[in-house]
Image (cartoon, helix red, strand yellow):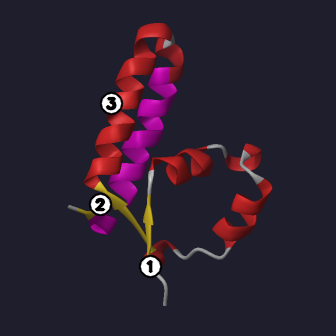
Amino acid sequence: MTKWLLDTVIISELRKLGRADRQFMIWEKTLSGLDAWISVIALNDISYGIHLIAVRDPKFATQLRGTGIAISLSNSSRLVC
């Protein structure tokens, strides 16, 4: 069984839902949640990116914060420290 460490690019594509790259969507459908891990470094990068976006687009940053919270809570047992 292959395990995947998801980076910020992958997490960003997951957030796009129906707008994500077609090849990514095909791959994503084969991914089991038990095979995916997120590093605390990726979560920190996402948090920092949202902070930078908040300066120029507070509304979008708020939307992203909701997504980030959902990711970190739903995958808390899938974090790599």
Q: Which mark is residue 76?
A: 2
- The vertical placement of 22 against 68, above or below, is below
Q: Secondary structure at mark 2?
A: helix
Question: Residue 59, percent across and down?
Answer: 52, 15
Was residue 62 drawn as part of the magenta stretch in this picture? yes
- Whichever of callouts 1 and 2 sits on the residue coming sooner in the sequence is 1
Q: Amino acid at mark 1?
A: Lys
Chain part drawn in magenta: 61-79
**Residue 22 pos. (x, y %):** 79, 56
Question: Dot 1: what SS?
Answer: loop
Q: Earlier in the sequence, mark 3 or mark 2?
A: 3
Q: Label 1: which residue?
A: 3
Majority secondary structure of the magenta segment?
helix
At a point 51% along the width and 12% down the height, the residue shown is 57
How far is the residue under mark 3 from the one under mark 2?
Answer: 19 Å
Q: Secondary structure at mark 3?
A: helix
Please state if 66 lies on the left or on the right of 77 as rendered. Answer: right
Q: Amino acid at mark 3?
A: Tyr
Q: Evaluate if marks 1 and 2 touch, with contact meaning CB atoms under 8 Å apart.
A: no
